[in-house]
């Protein structure tokens, strides 16, 4: 499995219409969580964030919101941002444009947000143009740092190191509140919150500027 733990500058320039990090934010870091809400894991994340008065952005799957609406509502009630992650976690590279767009719209009935993250980070230019041209005028949010909590071939210590060694001011960091990532995320997240808080960083949610 190949991926960049830290997104290289050339890739950000190549896809400059996507948001990879947040500029001019001082000592702020932006935690994001994909694929929820989950009936227990999302609750763990919210509890940890609350300990540090931290805010984050949750890119949610529509079908998961349908199944666990009370968990989704808790995310909102506790002041976090949410974003659209399609209704069924579709891979844009393998999905026809119209089907992809309809799936995003279906999720949009439950997720009232202009923020959008394509599952797997895979989206065609034609799909991006359609999302931008839509009434919602989606803002596509990628990332600066991958924790790689989804990777079954790395240790939980490596997952933590991925974040501690690569995050900086303005970084958008990806974790997952999902079953597959549970062990690594639940180990790394508390340590990330503690480490950067002690260094004077703030954890903020992504907002449309």
Image (cartoon, helix red, strand yellow):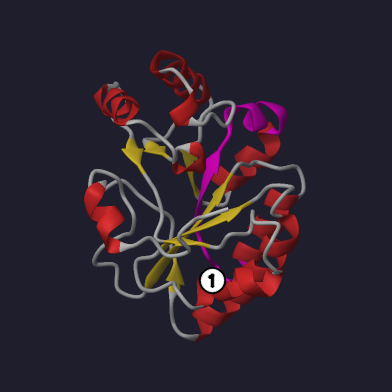
Q: Nearer the viewer, residue 150 or 71?
A: 150
Q: Which residue is drawn at 22% across and 54% down?
A: 13
Q: In this view, does 60 lie above or below 137?
A: below
Whole-percent x, y for residue 81 in the image: 47, 47
Q: In this view, does 45 lie to the left or right of 29?
A: right
Whole-percent x, y for residue 198 in the image: 52, 85
Quadrant of the rendered image containing residue 100: top left
Res. 51 in view: no
Q: Residues within 10 Å of mark 1 (few under 14, many from 20)?
A: some
Res. 56 in view: yes
Q: Which of 78 and 40 is in front in this view?
A: 40
Element type at mark 1: helix
Q: Does the magenta stretch include residue 52?
A: yes
Whole-percent x, y for residue 85 in the image: 50, 35
Q: Which residue is drawn at 35% across and 31% down?
A: 124
Quadrant of the rendered image containing residue 190: bottom right
Q: How many labels does the image show?
A: 1
Q: In this view, does 170 lie to the left or right of 104?
A: left
Q: Which residue is drawn at 67% across and 61% down?
A: 185
Where does label 1 land, which residue? 162
Q: In this view, does 148 lie above or below 94?
A: below
Q: In this view, does 148 lie above or below 65?
A: below
Quadrant of the rendered image containing residue 170: bottom left
Range of magenta residues = 50-68
Q: Is residue 17 magenta?
A: no
Q: Residue at x 56, y 26 (%)?
A: 87
Q: In this view, does 23 lie to the left or right of 68?
A: left
Whole-percent x, y for residue 131 in the image: 32, 26
């Amino acid at each position: 499995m190949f991926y960049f733990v830290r997104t290289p500058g050339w890739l950000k320039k190549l896809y400059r219409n996507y948001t990879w990090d947040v500029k001019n934010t001082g000592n702020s870091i932006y935690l994001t969580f994909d694929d929820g809400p989950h009936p227990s894991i999302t609750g763990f994340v919210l509890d940890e964030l609350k300990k540090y008065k931290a805010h984050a952005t949750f890119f949610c799957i529509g079908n998961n919101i349908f199944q666990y609406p009370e968990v989704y509502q808790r995310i909102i009630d506790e002041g976090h941002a949410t974003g659209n992650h399609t209704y069924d976690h579709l891979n844009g590279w393998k999905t026809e444009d119209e089907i992809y767009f309809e799936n995003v719209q279906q999720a949009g009935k439950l997720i009232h947000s202009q923020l959008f993250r394509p599952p797997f980070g895979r989206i065609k230019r034609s799909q991006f143009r359609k999302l931008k041209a839509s009434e919602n005028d989606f803002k596509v949010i990628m990332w600066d740092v991958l924790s790689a909590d989804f990777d079954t071939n790395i240790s939980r210590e490596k997952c933590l190191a991925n974040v501690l060694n690569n995050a900086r001011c303005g970084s958008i960091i990806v974790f997952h509140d999902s079953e597959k990532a549970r062990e690594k995320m639940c180990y790394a997240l508390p340590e990330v919150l503690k480490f950067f808080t002690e260094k004077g960083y703030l954890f903020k949610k992504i907002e449309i500027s």
